[in-house]
Image (spheres, rainbow, N blue to C red):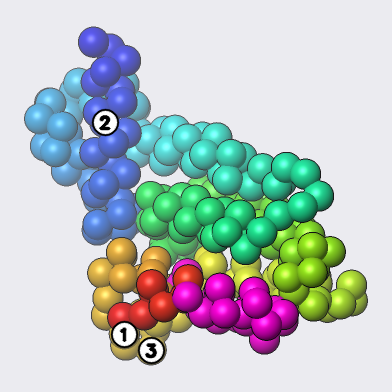
Amino acid sequence: MKGDTRNRILVASLLLFNEHGEPNTRTNDIADEVDISPGNLHYHFRRKEHIVHALLDEFRVDARRVLEPPAGDRISIDDFWLFLHLLLELTAAYRFLFRDLESLAGTYARIDRTLGHFARGLESVFELYLRLLTTGGQLTVGDADAPAIGRNLAVIALFSARFDELTGLSVSPDDAALRVAGSILKALKPFSVASAAAHIEDLAAHYRN
């Protein structure tokens, strides 16, 4: 039961952080969501900081799976599409980390370091996909251009939803993820050969809203 209560606290915390933001969520709110006393929550996590760090540990485990390099030297646009889905599921599941990044990084040093490692890893994985798709004859990305394009794709993946918020676009988290997926696929299209461009266009059509 001890482990079950701890997990319930983490699940409830993640849901509340995602919905309201970590700075706007109190430990009493979490206790109410789990239907336990504040004292019981305190038994498992003495401070909200410990909850945030536990969720950050979960994020790191999930992120390592997503950033696993593609197996083999031959990949397809569909392989990239699957990676993109896993990535967006991850960032949606932990969206409070990216939405509240500035305030969280100022409060929790571990978040700044962890998300910095994640961003650099994501940039590298995007670059690897670009190179492998080019080697496979599906893209035409030059060696000198791959790092910059990989960086641009990582920026779109991590921060375009925040950009939409800043420009006044109000969409649900699900619709925001769809917009990100469509934007990344559209960014690939100019570098694709004709057959791959048609397939990318078909995939991108699923994300128009």
What span is colored magenta in the figure?
Answer: 180-202
What whole-number distance in Å separates the C-alpha atoms at marks 1 and 3?
A: 6 Å
- Across the whole image, how many numbered discs are drawn on residues? 3
Instruction: Identify which residue, 172 or 139, lies in the foreground.
Output: 139
Amino acid of disc 2: Ile
Q: Are marks 2 and 3 in contact (CB under 8 Å)?
A: no
| Residue visible at 30% across and 54% down in the picture | 18
Q: Earlier in the sequence, mark 1 or mark 2?
A: 2
Mark 1 element type: loop
| Residue visible at 39% across and 74% down in the picture | 207
Which of discs 1 and 2 lies nearer the camera? The answer is 1
The x and y percentages for residue 200 are: 56, 74
Q: Which corner quadrant holds the C terminus?
A: bottom left
Question: Splitting the image into 4 quarters, where does residue 110 fall?
Answer: top right
The prevailing secondary structure element of the residues shown in magenta is helix
Instruction: Identify which residue, 3 or 77, lies in the foreground.
Output: 77
Q: Are marks 1 and 3 in contact (CB under 8 Å)?
A: yes
Instruction: Farthest residue to the top: give it.
Output: 1
Question: Splitting the image into 4 quarters, where does residue 47 fall?
Answer: top left
Q: Residue 9, labelled with which disc?
A: 2
Residue corresponding to mark 1: 169
What whole-number distance in Å separates the C-alpha atoms at marks 2 and 3?
A: 34 Å
Drawn side of residue 76 relative to residue 60, left or right: right
Residue corresponding to mark 3: 167
Residue 29 visible from this viewpoint: yes
Amino acid of disc 3: Thr
| Residue visible at 18% across and 23% down in the picture | 39
Q: Residue 136, labelled with which disc?
A: none
